[in-house]
Image (cartoon, rainbow, N blue to C red):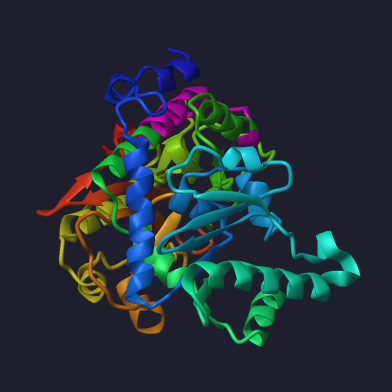
Amino acid sequence: MTILDWHAERSDLAGLHLLDQAPESAGIDLKAVRLYRLGRVRNEMAKRNIDALIISDPVNIRYASGARNMQIFCARNTPSRYLLVTASKNILFEFTGCEHLGEGFETIDEVRPSMTASFVAAGPDIQAREKRWARDMLATISEITGPRPIVGMERMNAGSAISLAELGVKVVDAQESLEMARCIKSAEELKCVVASLRATERAVENLRAAIRPGITENELWSVLHQSVIAENGDYCETRLLSSGSRTNPWFQECASKLIGENELIALDTDVVGCHGYYSDFSRTFHSGPAAPSELQRTLYKMAHEQVQHNLGIIKPGMSFREYSDQAWNIPEQFHANRYYLSAHGVGMTGEYPYLYHHADYTDAGYDGLILPGMTLCVESYIGEKAGAEGVKLEEQILVTETGIEVLSKFPFEEALLS
């Protein structure tokens, strides 16, 4: 058997092709998805007496309206496009020359060209531009909501918020409304999540089949990228693939390092995939051709045990503190290199809530409830400080009315679990 065959011959991977072959919109009511999400945002605004939200994060624009345009570019060049959400009317201020991209959405009542109030666009006239932007925006909001609106803002340059405040506007942070809206998924939304996961799993299957000593980490990571784009996914949010000694500590991005024989290869997908939904699971592989070492198997089995234990305790109605108290306690020799979270919310990207390890709860944790409709990622990284290698594993789940459903279906490595 060749090294490549050692990776490619996997009977437990074949079923991934059959789980969800849905092309975009097939079997998914995307109109219902968009209307549900907008309704969630408006409900959270109403709870906080917010009259208008000015949304500039491209992911949140997409969540509240369905409109997508150059998400990575617009995340870096804020505010190049933004969405005004009120209880009765939504206006998308689209990037110059792109107004046509916002047409046809039932969640968008009007599309206007944006005014880019950034230093790059305005240069030394930035303050005048910000003041003009604030005057125009206040006039638009007041026409819809009436005078003295409470306005939620996010991710815009400080001068824009300062200029609105100088006009007498009460400016509040939009994050809470948006995060609380996003954390509960509808049944149609979950179809988008699953479609994204199945496509990403097929991409990881292709990556796994390409593993061989002598390939670089970058070349291997490019297999995932190509497959994600071919499956109508959007992009990979990180570059988290490493091999051998670069698996410890975690968070070393892929590089030109050659993968050697009998090394571990660890990855975290972090894929913004089909319909804009995040596929977030982690796996660790072995390069072969020999069997994994006892140390490699020990690290893998411990990471697997942590994930399975924490999956086993999650239930609807559980508080974040209860989860932290009952979560798997990381052995002392692995504590320094632990993953910074025990679990986290996931939707169109990583989101609320963050669930912390027991040892970190006092300093970093906050309380809340795990609720039906939340989608979570349960994490593990096991690697000793200054150790030779480490293992990263992660599963993506849905919290149901009675327990959980594991949504990520990519198999674990029997050779590392045995």
Residue 23 x %, y %: 40, 23
Quadrant where the C terminus is found in the figure: top left
Asked if one can make out residue 251 in the rendered structure from this viewpoint, the answer is no
The image quadrant that residue 118 belongs to is: bottom right
* Residue found at the far top of this picture: 1
404 in the magenta segment: no
Identify the residue shown where x is 29% and y is 33%.
414
Res 373 seen here: yes
Residue at the (50%, 39%) spot, across then down? 265
Q: Residue at x 23, y 65 (%)?
A: 370
Residue 154 on image: x %, y % = 56, 68
- Left or right of 387? Residue 304 is left
| Nearer to the camera, 327 or 189 | 189
3 or 109, nearer to the observer: 109
Residue shown at 21% from the left, 56% from the top:
309
User: Height in image: 44 above or below 95?
Assistant: below
Give the left or right position of residue 292, taking residue 185 as reference.
right
Q: Quadrant of the N terminus?
A: top left
Residue situated furthest right in the rendering = 124
The segment highlighted magenta reads 197-218
Residue 199 drawn in magenta: yes
